[in-house]
């Protein structure tokens, strides 16, 4: 489902009310191709928050249902964009504190149009470990995700699986 949020440049971006927050994507120029055509990324206001306080302000404008059901133009959740924008654990912990465990797990497992859950887009190993701890994602789910995770996370998961297998063999 294409959400058709309005797309603005960063200098035009302004949140006057909840509708601006829910219905705006921000276009960021990231590069130019060899023909000189600009290449852009599109982000939510949540991903582009420069401070945790601003993020809290935005989240506080929404109900829990609006947080859970929020989708960007790529059908990603708020977590997808804060992962893409490399936000630290404090952003995740804040959402967790607002929506609580069950809804947080739904957000982590939600797939965007490309079939990616938010957790598979995490590049930072420590953040990945913390999200796994918070959500209690089980081994089979982690194995399913590995084809889309970064190499560092795949190596970490492989070591966990090897260690678990060794422990299992020692018990038998």
Image (cartoon, rainbow, N blue to C red):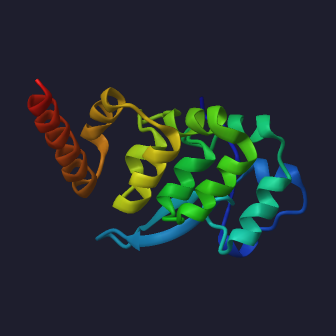
Residue at screen point 52% across, 45% down: 134
User: Which one is in front, 121 or 39?
Assistant: 121
Relative to residue 12, is residue 9 drawn left or right? Answer: left
Relative to residue 60, is residue 111 drawn left or right? Answer: left
Residue at screen point 72% across, 64% down: 55
User: Which one is in front, 144 or 9?
Assistant: 144
User: Which one is in front, 124 or 32?
Assistant: 124
The N terminus sits in image quarter:
top right
Relative to residue 61, is residue 120 drawn left or right? Answer: left
The C terminus sits in image quarter:
top left
Residue 21 falls in image quadrant? bottom right
Q: Is residue 112 visible?
A: no
Q: Is residue 38 visible?
A: yes
| x and y, in percent, of residue 125 in the image | 34, 59
Relative to residue 55, is residue 29 drawn left or right? Answer: left
Residue at screen point 25% across, 38% down: 147
| x and y, in percent, of residue 151 in the image | 21, 54
Residue at screen point 80% across, 67% down: 14
User: Which one is in front, 16 or 147?
Assistant: 147
Residue 94 falls in image quadrant? bottom right
């Amino acid at each position: 489902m294409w959400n058709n949020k309005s797309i603005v440049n960063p200098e035009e971006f302004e949140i006057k009310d909840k509708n601006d927050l829910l219905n705006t994507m921000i276009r960021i120029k990231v590069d130019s191709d060899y023909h000189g055509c600009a290449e852009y990324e599109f982000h939510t206001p949540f991903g582009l928050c420069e401070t945790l306080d601003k993020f809290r302000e935005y989240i506080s404008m929404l109900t829990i249902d609006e947080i859970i059901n929020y989708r960007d133009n790529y059908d990603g959740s708020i977590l997808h964009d804060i992962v893409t924008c490399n936000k630290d654990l404090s952003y995740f912990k804040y959402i967790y504190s607002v929506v609580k465990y069950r809804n947080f797990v739904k957000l982590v497992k939600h797939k965007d149009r490309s079939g990616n859950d938010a957790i598979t887009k995490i590049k930072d190993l420590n953040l990945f470990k913390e999200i796994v701890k918070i959500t209690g994602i089980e081994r089979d789910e982690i194995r399913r995700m590995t084809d889309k995770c970064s190499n560092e996370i795949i190596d970490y998961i492989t070591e966990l699986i090897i260690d678990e297998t060794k422990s299992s063999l020692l018990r038998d």
